[in-house]
Image: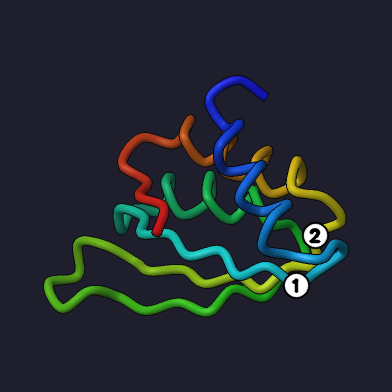
Amino acid sequence: MEGFEILIERLEANHNFPTVYMFKFIVPNSPEKEAEFQALFPGVELATKISKNGKFIGYTANVMMNTPLDIARIYKKATTIAGVIAL
């Protein structure tokens, strides 16, 4: 997957798959962005925290991932949502 080779290599070196992987993102606080983001994790309960000024929402998702490529695919989809920051 172009642009995610280093991530995939590091995941392979540091995790035994399948594994529960923790995703953390910051998303602009708007209904449209929230809906776009939550679509990345259908059926997954997301922990949320609103920023002090209310402009952003922090999301944490613990998801069972089968391969490093599965993780990279989620990060790649997240890059299509304007304003999303991956931690």
Dot 2 corresponds to which residue?
65
- Nearer to me, 22 or 48: 22
State the quadrant of the C terminus.
Answer: bottom left
Compared across the picture, whether 67 is left or right of 85 comes to right
Is 28 on the left-hand or right-hand side of 62?
Answer: left
Type of amino acid under label 1: Val
Which quadrant, please, contains the N terminus? top right
Determine the CA span between mark 2 and mark 1: 6 Å
User: Where residue 2 is drawn, which disc sits there?
Assistant: none
Where residue 84 sits: x, y (%)?
37, 46
Q: Residue placed at 42% from the left, 47% from the top?
A: 33
Q: Residue 76: x, y in percent?
A: 57, 34
Mark with earlier residue (2, 1): 1
- Against 56, residue 32 (above or below) is above
Image coordinates for residue 8, horizontal then vertical, percent: 66, 42
Circle 1: element type: strand
Q: What element carries label 2?
A: strand
User: Looking at the image, do the residues carrying marks 2 and 1 touch, with CB atoms under 8 Å apart?
Assistant: yes
Seen in the picture, residue 70 relative to 34 is either above or below; the reply is above
| Quarter of image, res 7 | top right
Q: Which of 51 and 8 is in front in this view?
A: 8
